[in-house]
Amino acid sequence: MGLIMKALASMAALSSLASTAALPVDTKQLVKRDACADGPHGNVLEVGGSTGDHFCEIRIASSGEIITGLEVWSDNDNGIRGILFTWSGGQGMMHGTQNGDSKSITFAPGEKVQAATLWGDGTAKQLGHIYLKTDKQEFDVGKDKPNDGYQIDVGSGLLLGASGNNGASIDSLALLFLATEISSVTIGGIKFDSDPTGSSDNIAPSYLIQSTMGNPSGSHGNVSFTVLGSEAVAQSTTWEQSTTGTFGMKYSVEMDAAPLGVGAKVTGGYEWSVAHTSSKATTTTDTITITQSAGPISIAPGFGKSCKIFAQKGTGTFPYSSTVTVNLVDGTTLSYQEPGKLVSVQYTQAYASCDDANNPIDWTSTTNNPPPGVQIVGTGN
């Protein structure tokens, strides 16, 4: 893949043809001088003249970026004067000059180019006109068309990059489309910038119940009670990186990495650890119910108990580097490095803890109106 052919109009041949005839094409293989000469794109036609400074814009192998927009300046005397390419990472790259009237197109994630045509300026000196048709819109910019133009092979419809020559105008242009459809994308090789496993950062108790129960000092015997805490909570794992939006939602993006969980340390306390369960989804959200109880607990007259039912909740954002592998339907693959971050909210199982609350105060109100989660199961005589 990647054979770049150059279309050069011959002025001598043009003078012998009717004005409605297509410009003749002189094709030759370009020297492989940069990344645009070979790659995951198919045969590419470069249209226009042969002067100006060469440029090559393609980033799929280095950062996984594709072109998501064009702003084009043109006038009817010179044709295409300048092009600003916008990348999926948000950066723009300008070639030519911002002279003439401008017109722009922005591609939505997953939007595909269905047809593309390029024209010279009619004198074989520079690029004259650009036409793109996607599955959502059309883009038509440049000087009056001198002929039928050159149909460009759009392959899969994803615009990976562009090459050509430029100076005060765009002298020539080739559009580089991904030749083959994407079948799936896999993100793996996760390496955290700072490995969170074993760390207790941002892990703290999340209380379901905090209740205090007592037996009045004037009662005739012990009071027995139980305490129950139960709550539905959402825990989630989200792997955030550009690839999940670059190619659109049509393609399957799978994670080849285990999520993090929160577990008990052998030496006491809690820590981030690799979860025992795994998912290939880039985002998982589960609603779980954490439940725990304590009791029956017997309290003598004039004494009380303070009970807590809680789970450990970990909330963290962990930057990482990854390897993205783009699998194409023809069996070939593309790989590149990309940063990302894991956003995780996790809970442990629930625990119960009851401590003495032996203040000599009147507990009559707790006996008559038990606090949340408390149920009296027996009283003395």
Image (cartoon, grey):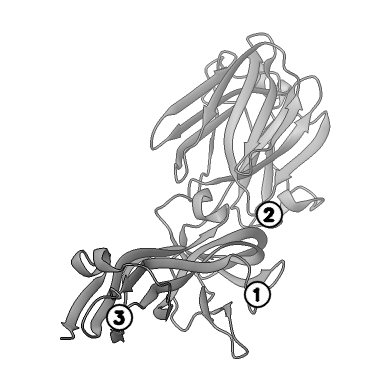
Q: Which-is-in-front pick, marks 1 and 3?
A: 3
Q: Position of residue 250 (x, y in %)?
A: 39, 54
Q: Which of the marked residues, 1 or 3, is nearer the chain's N terminus?
A: 1
Residue at 41%, 66% (x, y): give it.
Answer: 207
Q: Position of residue 231 (x, y in %)?
A: 30, 67
Q: Which residue is mark 3?
A: 301
Inter-mark Cα distance, 2 to 3: 72 Å
Residue type, label 3: Pro
Residue at 51%, 71% (x, y): give it.
Answer: 331
Inter-mark Cα distance, 1 to 3: 45 Å
Residue at 47%, 63% (x, y): give it.
Answer: 282
> Considering the image in quadrants, where does the C terminus appear?
bottom left
* Most foreground residue, 69 or 239: 239
Residue found at the very far front of the displayed protein: 218
* Most foreground residue, 128 or 256: 256
Inter-mark Cα distance, 2 to 1: 31 Å
Residue type, label 1: Ser
Residue at 72%, 17% (x, y): give it.
Answer: 98
Q: Position of residue 312 (x, y in %)?
A: 48, 72
Q: Which of the marked residues, 2 or 3, is nearer the chain's N terminus?
A: 2
Is residue 258 shown left or right of residue 40? left
Q: Which-is-in-front pick, marks 2 and 1?
A: 1
Q: Which-is-in-front pick, marks 2 and 3?
A: 3
Q: Residues within 10 Å of mark 1 (few under 14, many from 20)?
A: some
The reply to whether callout 2 and callout 3 are in contact (CB within 8 Å) is no
Q: Which mark is on residue 199?
A: 1
Residue 284 visible in the current orientation? yes
Q: Residues within 10 Å of mark 2 (few under 14, many from 20)?
A: some
Q: Which residue is mark 2?
A: 63
